[in-house]
Image (cartoon, rainbow, N blue to C red):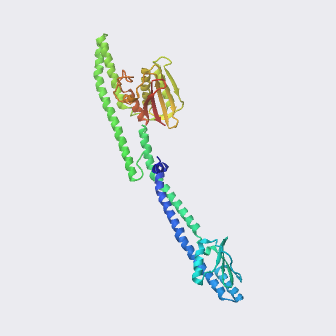
Amino acid sequence: MWHPFRALRRALPHRLFGRSLLIIVTPVVVLQGIVTYAFFERHYDIMTMRMTHGVAADVAFLVDLSERQPDAAQRAALLEMAARNLGYRISFVPSQHLTGPNVHKAPHINDVLALTFQQQLGEAHSFSSRIIGKYLDLSIDTKSGTLQLMIPKERMIAGNADIFILWMVISALVLLSIAIIFLRNQVRPIERLARAAEAFGRGRAVPDFRPRGATEVRRAAQAFLTMRERIDRYVQQRTEMLAGVSHDLKTPLTRLKLQLAMMGDNPDAEALRQDVADMEHMLDEYLNFARGEGGEEAKSTDVSQLVYDAVAAAGRGNSPGRMTTEIAPGLILPVKPNALRRCLNNLIDNALKHGSKAMVALRRAQDGGVVEILVDDDGPGIPEARREEAFRPFHRLDEGRNLQSGGSGLGLAIARDIARAHGGELTLADSPLGGLRAVIRLPV
């Protein structure tokens, strides 16, 4: 069903600058439209009526003069004097009267002429009118003939309409220019804040950001800086705590390893050595998960080369032909290289662990704003309903494909955490190879 308000919202500007400018410009345009309408409908018409009324009074006086002066010579002299004083072209055709229907091609002044003639002459006089260039050609019937006048239009029609419109347009352009400059200066700090928040969400440093602009914008910017400090402090405290726990636990594990080394080779000692190695591995993964590569700075990196190196490193311990690649060259992005390499290693290890072959692809999405890294395998896959469950930290899937078999249940959790630290996302889908596809999407 079509909703007019929804259509209107889609038609409105999406940016704050455009909407603010629309809020300012719309009342100005509406107000000028109302003023223009009032001017032309009221002032302009009133002025025209008053000017036409004055001209009609002059014509009525000339008609009365020509009717009261029967002598042709004196009448001509008086009309000539009136023409000089009034600025009209006046001629009198004796013994000639208007016949047939009157021609009125100046309808906006005919009513005023007819009313004035009737009021001042006391009776109706036939007349015809038409516009010829800059003049009104007016013929009026009198008792002794026809009085013909060529009256300048400027004597009856207000001629300042174009000046009024010009001033309105100029004033509107000046106001619009001032509004654009003012709004641009007000919106720019908000745009800086948005860029800083976006960069922080992608794990990139924003060293030169400072609160600027209006009081409300400064408060929002200061709140963003405070939030960023709290998040950084939280990550640092979590890392330090886990590092301390790891260090404290590794000390007794080291003593156990020394004691096991002195026990010699026997089945019981070998089982204990394996348990100790598993505990060390789990402690390292817990620390990596807590750290999340948060201390690494993002820098411009050749992601194509990084993916190629990760695939080459993973393929050294596997038989040839297990891995294939489709890597688009020359993709440069600001990323944390060590963190992204670790994310790829986790996904490639999972693919090789649960499938007989794997394929790694790097490509730019069709919209050009996202780079995708795809890791496919031909393993048993994960049911769609349980894919989000696979990302839960310390969680192992009990049936189907166990992505974390032999691990701590942190591989996918660490990979997604790294992808999101870059402002991207990690999702799971069906693979064309028949198994699982892991997709990393990184913003450009």
Quarter of the rendering containing residue 164: bottom right
* The residue positioned farthest toward the front in the image shown: 100
Q: Is residue 239 above or below residue 127?
A: above
Q: Is residue 159 above or below residue 284?
A: below
Residue positioned 35% across, 41% down in the render:
229
Asked if residue 164 lies left or right of residue 77, the reply is left
Instruction: List x then y, in percent, for residue 372.
Output: 48, 32
Instruction: List x then y, in percent, for residue 214.
Output: 41, 53
Instruction: List x then y, in percent, for residue 3.
Output: 46, 49
Q: Give the mark count.
A: 0
Quarter of the rendering containing residue 158: bottom right
Quarter of the rendering containing residue 84: bottom right
Q: Nearer the viewer, residue 190 or 136?
A: 136
Instruction: List x then y, in percent, for residue 194.
Output: 43, 45
Asked if residue 79 lies left or right of residue 174, the reply is right
Residue positioned 38% across, 26% down in the render:
411
Query: Residue 255, can we see it?
Result: yes
Q: Nearer the viewer, residue 1 or 168?
A: 1
Q: Is residue 438 above or below residue 222?
A: above
Q: Is residue 286 above or below residue 32?
A: above
Asked if residue 102 lies left or right of residue 351, the reply is right
Residue positioned 37% across, 41% down in the render:
228
Query: Residue 207, can we see it?
Result: no
